[in-house]
Image (tube, rainbow, N blue to C red):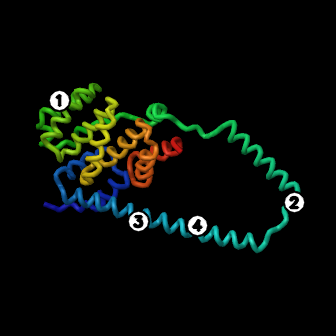
Amino acid sequence: MKTIDFSYYIERYIAGEMSDTEKIWFHKELDGNEKLLSEVNLRKQTNEILRNKDIISLRNKLSGIEKQRNQTATQRKPQKPGYIKYAATTAAIILLGSLVLFPGKKLGSEEIMNRYYKAYEPATTQRSFKVTANDDFNQALEFYKIHDFSNAAIYFNKVVQSEPKNMYSTLLYGISNFEEKKYPEAKVTFGKVITDNNNLYIDQAQWYLALCYINTDEKSKALLILEKIKQENSIYKDDAKKIIKKLK
């Protein structure tokens, strides 16, 4: 049997370039393949390190350009004509007035949820045989699908108790509590998924943890996580950028 070289597929997966069909296939390949899962996580970490280096390099270049520009400006300071000074003053007054009349609107937690939140849809095709054979999971999923999150949480919790390493059920247990506005319980659960750091649901757990902090008015904690989501290749990075602007 020919061995599959996953390097190409890993890069496409991390870059978000896979089609839905490819994602389903790749998730099946990841299921139970610890070596492949570790390689995916290692590539993600490597990309983040390289991205941070690029940011630092760009920042240093911009700093050098700004320093050179300031030195040039100091050496020659041409006298501006009076009409230019007048135009600049007028523009400043107009700009100040526009800021007073049309300030950047900060959104409250309810407005943010209405604008950016979309309930997570479980991808049942990603389940392993072990999970599929779990009656509690199947019952929990049925309650989740009809938005009976209270009962869904009860059954997902049973799965988590019997299978502590089942991060998929752990995530859905957290989301069920989130939907019931049980944010303290949800925070703990999402933290477990993130701390595990060896599963496919870290993006979702980070996103929901940030939303928990937004709903509990812990803006500084929410911003920290949203900034992390923005810097990583998360499926939620675009929404994270928008929410950051509305919170600051």
Residue 238 visible: no
Q: Quadrant of residue 2?
A: bottom left
Whether 56 is drawn above or below 229: the answer is below
Q: Residue furthest right?
A: 82
In depth, the one of 75 and 187 nearer the eye is 187
> Is 114 left or right of 170, judged from the image as shown?
right
| Rendered residue at 34%/31% (across/down) | 181
Residue 58 visible: yes
Q: Which mark is residue 62?
A: 4
Q: Which mark is residue 81?
A: 2
Label 3 belongs to which residue?
50
SS at mark 3 in the image = helix
Whether 77 is drawn above or below 197: the answer is below
| Rendered residue at 26%/27% (across/down) | 150
Q: Quadrant of residue 33?
A: bottom left
Q: CA distance from mark 2 to mark 1?
A: 78 Å
Ranked by sequence position, the earlier of labels 3 and 4 is 3
Whether 108 is drawn above or below 22: the answer is above
Image marks 3 and 4: residues in contact by CB distance under 8 Å = no
Q: Quadrant of residue 145?
A: top left
Q: CA distance from mark 4 to mark 2?
A: 30 Å
> Percent position (x, y) of residue 114?
45, 31
Mark 1 neighbour class, 10 Å CA radius: few under 14, some 14 to 19, many 20 or more: some
> Percent position (x, y) of residue 127?
19, 42
Q: CA distance from mark 3 to mark 2?
A: 48 Å
SS at mark 2 in the image = loop
Label 1 belongs to which residue?
139
